[in-house]
């Protein structure tokens, strides 16, 4: 079976990260859409995404 290319061409590597879920999302309640936004802000600020 052939390996599929990453969705949208992005590869995200979290290896070696020490942040907790609270560090990324905060302690309050969040809607799924807000979680997605905060996750992408974190990924872009730490330069974890690449093509």
Image (tube, grey):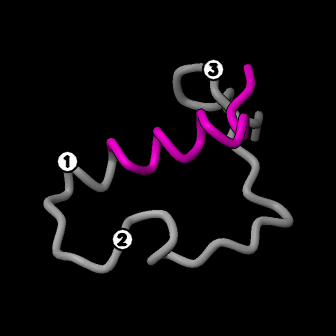
As drawn, is 22 to the left or to the right of 9? left
As drawn, is 35 to the left or to the right of 17? left
The image quarter in which residue 47 lies: top right
The residue wearing badge 1 is: 33
The image quarter in which residue 5 lies: top right
The residue wearing badge 2 is: 26
Q: Residues within 10 Å of mark 2 (few under 14, many from 20)?
A: few
Q: In this rendering, which labeled residue sits more in front, label 3 or label 2?
A: 2
Per the image, label 1 sits on a secondary structure element best described as: helix
Magenta-drawn segment: 37-51
- Residue 14, above or below 37: below
Q: CA distance from mark 1 to mark 2?
A: 14 Å
Q: CA distance from mark 3 to mark 1?
A: 21 Å
Q: Position of residue 51 (x, y in %)?
A: 73, 19
Residue 9 - label: 3
Mark 3 and mark 2 residues within 8 Å of each other at the beta carbon:
no
């Amino acid at each position: 079976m052939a390996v599929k290319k990453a969705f949208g061409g992005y590869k995200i590597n979290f290896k070696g990260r020490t942040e907790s879920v609270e560090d990324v999302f905060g302690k309050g309640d969040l809607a799924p859409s807000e979680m997605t936004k905060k996750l992408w802000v974190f990924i872009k600020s730490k330069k974890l995404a690449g093509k």
